[in-house]
Structures are given as structure tokens and as C-alpha cells.
Amino acid sequence: MSYIVPAPDPVILPTSDGNEFPVRRVYLIGRNYAAHAREMGYDPDREPPFFFTKWPNTIVVGGGKIAYPPKTENYHFEAELVVALDKGGANINAANAQDLIYGYAVGLDMTRRDLQQQAKDMGRPWDYGKNVDQSCPVALLHPASEIGHPENGAVWLDQNGERKQDGDLNQLIWSVSEIISILSEHYTLAPGDIIFTGTPAGVGPVVPGDKLQVHVDGLTDLHVEIV
């Protein structure tokens, strides 16, 4: 028995303790910082959490150069804390959610904002705007056994050396444990799943040649160049 086409290579995130983390699925929560929700025209006090997904092969391991995608004139950065799970389950109580977490990394949720807005206006899914090749750069993954479970700490992004996003993990509307719990009500989570936890205010467009540095306290910075 042989494959009709070659099996896709797995997406593997290196870890700070010298191991490798294979990625199974990629979940993202929308508008999880109040200031970002407001800059996008929404009232964070009235909105329940919601999620969307990206393909694992949108991940760019370690950052580096990523291509400006086609069909957009408004490609945006969104700096985020990424959570990696080494255990799974359904209907997880928030009090037990940390038991599922392997570790944390810095990530970017790159977005074709104009196509996302068109989808919103037409009541259509966000896939054209969000699920984009090379749209999920992720830096080195740090195990929770090494750094703990961060609940406070700066989250920022510099574009060509100028600070554009500046927030703190304590500004999350839904905490990491709550995110895992709520998501597990809708999906059976599994080892290898990763979750992007939302972005602070200050999102904005890039052009080819831009250099981005993304930081979360206690984690390895992510560096990306748009080409």
C-alpha cells in the first residue's frame, strides 16, 4: 500500500528544553482585549467569547521572513500569547484547565483586514481574511514547568523599532483557563492543539520591508520581516 500523494510534513515547534512539539490544530479567540475590541468597533462588555481556526501549515516556525499575501491591500499584525496543550478533553472545568497546558510562546495572527471586513459586511466566514499562508509565525515554545503560568506581563509589538501595540496579560477579558474551558465545551481538545489568546489594541498594516518584533514577558521574542 502506498500513498497517492506524499503525506504532508508535520508542523513541529521546537521547545526551550530541547524537545519538539507537533502541532495538531490551531484555535484563535477573537477580540479578547477590551481596547482592541473597541478599536474594532465592538463593546467588549456585551460580547461572549468566540473562536476561529487556522490550518497548522499557516504556522511559520521561529518567525523570519514571511510573504505579503495576495488579494489584500491591508495586511495587519496582531501580537499574541500562544498556549500549547499536551493533554486534552471535553467540558474542562476552568479550575483544572492549567493541567492541560504544556507551555507558552509568542505568536502573530496576521490578518488580511480588508477581506475580513468584507466577510463581516456580507455575513460570511472569515477564512479569506484569517486562514492565510504564513499568517501564524510562532517563536520558541517554553514549557510551563520552566516558566510557570503567566497571568501578568507586558505584551508588545514594535514595527521598524516603533512601539505599536502595548498591553499586559492581565488585560485579557477571558483568562487562559477560561479560554480552554469554554473552547472544550465546543470541541474535544487534544494533545498538540495550540490556542492564540487574543491581541492588545494598536493593530495595524504592514508593507514589504517592515520588520516586526513581538514580545511577551518571560518568553523568547518573535522577529518577522515582511517580504
Image (cartoon, rainbow, N blue to C red):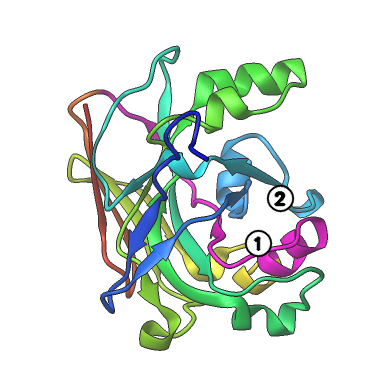
Q: State yes or no: residue 184 in magenta.
A: yes
Decide if residue 161 is on the left or right side of residue 43. Answer: left
| Quadrant of the rendered image containing residue 42 | top right
Q: Tell which circle, 2 or 1, labels the residue nearer the N-terminal end.
A: 2
Question: Could you say which disc has been placed on residue 173 in the image?
Answer: 1
- Residue at 18% x, 45% y is 161
Quarter the C terminus occupies: top left
Q: State yes or no: residue 151 in magenta.
A: no
Q: Quick one: label 2, few (<14), some, or many (20+) residues within 10 Å?
A: some
The one of 107 and 100 positioned closer to us in this rendering? 100
Helix, strand or loop at mark 2: helix
| Quadrant of the rendered image containing residue 91 | bottom right
Decide if residue 34 is on the left or right side of residue 188. Answer: left
Indicate the position of residue 54 as horizontal and vertical percent values.
Answer: 55, 40
The answer to whether the residues at label 2 and label 1 have Cβ atoms under 8 Å apart is yes
Which range of residues does the magenta coloring cover?
179-207
Q: How many marks?
A: 2
Indicate the position of residue 191 as horizontal and vertical percent values.
Answer: 58, 67
Indicate the position of residue 208 as horizontal and vertical percent values.
Answer: 23, 23
Decide if residue 74 is on the left or right side of residue 223. Answer: right
Helix, strand or loop at mark 1: loop
Q: Which residue is label 2 attached to?
A: 44
- Residue at 41% x, 26% y is 75
Tell me if residue 99 comes above or below residue 15 in the rendering. below
